[in-house]
Image (spheres, rainbow, N blue to C red):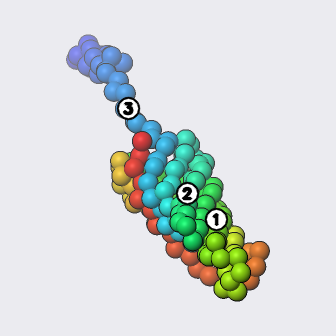
Amino acid sequence: MKRIFAFLAIALFATGLFGQQVEVITVNHPQEFGFHAGATTGIGLSYRYWPGKNGVQLTALPIKTSDEMYINVGLTALHTFHDSQYFRFFGYLGSSIVVDDYDLNDNESQNSNNHAKVNVGIGPGFAFGTRVRFNIMAGYGFYDVTGEFNIYPTGEIGLYFRL
């Protein structure tokens, strides 16, 4: 009886030693490209580089016609708090510069409006999806910090394709 228990014990331990190891392969997509709309992080085409816990986002929308110009450029720092295959919870600190210049060819017009605003925002964000990600960001925005300073809640959304 002792021999049977000893044989079973050795057989059970030996199978654990020679078991297969399964290697889980995860695909990391550090680059994302898409469209983003946010008052403090920028409006337009957006590129994100997110190799680890920290990332950066660049957003731009330049528009130029014969009589008007609109430029919106944003740069945002990103920090991941939780990341899974389908969900990401992160924080952001972003800044955007908005330049609009109407009536460029009419220098004598009293209605000519040359204006540049700098906006800054901070808050949490959520990303949903695997290959195509929908992003929602909310927080506080500090608008026109170089002119008439205002503080309002802000909301930002984006749709990104992970490269």
**Which residue is at a point 64% across and 72% down the rendered structure image?**
105
Rounded to the nearest angstrom, the CA distance separating label 3 from label 1 is 38 Å
Q: Amino acid at mark 3?
A: Ile
Mark before the other along the chain sequence, 1 or 2: 2
Q: Earlier in the sequence, mark 2 or mark 3?
A: 3
Secondary structure of the residue carrying numbered label 3: loop
Q: Quadrant for the N terminus, please.
A: top left
The residue where tag 3 is placed is 25
Front-most of residues 22 and 72? 72
Sequence-first tag of 3 and 1? 3
Q: Which residue lies at the image location 37% right of the left edge and 27% below the top edge?
A: 23
Mark 1 vs 2: CB contact within 8 A = yes
**Residue assigned mark 2:** 59
In front of the other: 5 or 132 = 132
> Which residue is found at the position 66% from the left and 66% from the top?
97
Badge 3 density bin: few <14, some 14–19, many ≥20, Cα 10 Å: few
- Occupied quadrant, residue 34: bottom left
State the mark number for residue 96: 1
Percent x, y of residue 15: 29, 19
Crowd band around label 2 with a 10 angstrom C-alpha radius: few (<14), some (14–19), many (20+) = many
Camera-nearest label, 3 or 1: 1
| Residue 91 visible, this orientation | no
x, y percent for residue 139: 58, 73
- Residue 119 lies, with reference to residue 91, above or below; the image says below
User: Which residue is outermost to the right?
Assistant: 146
Q: How many marks?
A: 3
Judge left or right: residue 105 versus residue 5: right
Closer to the eye: label 2 or 3: 2
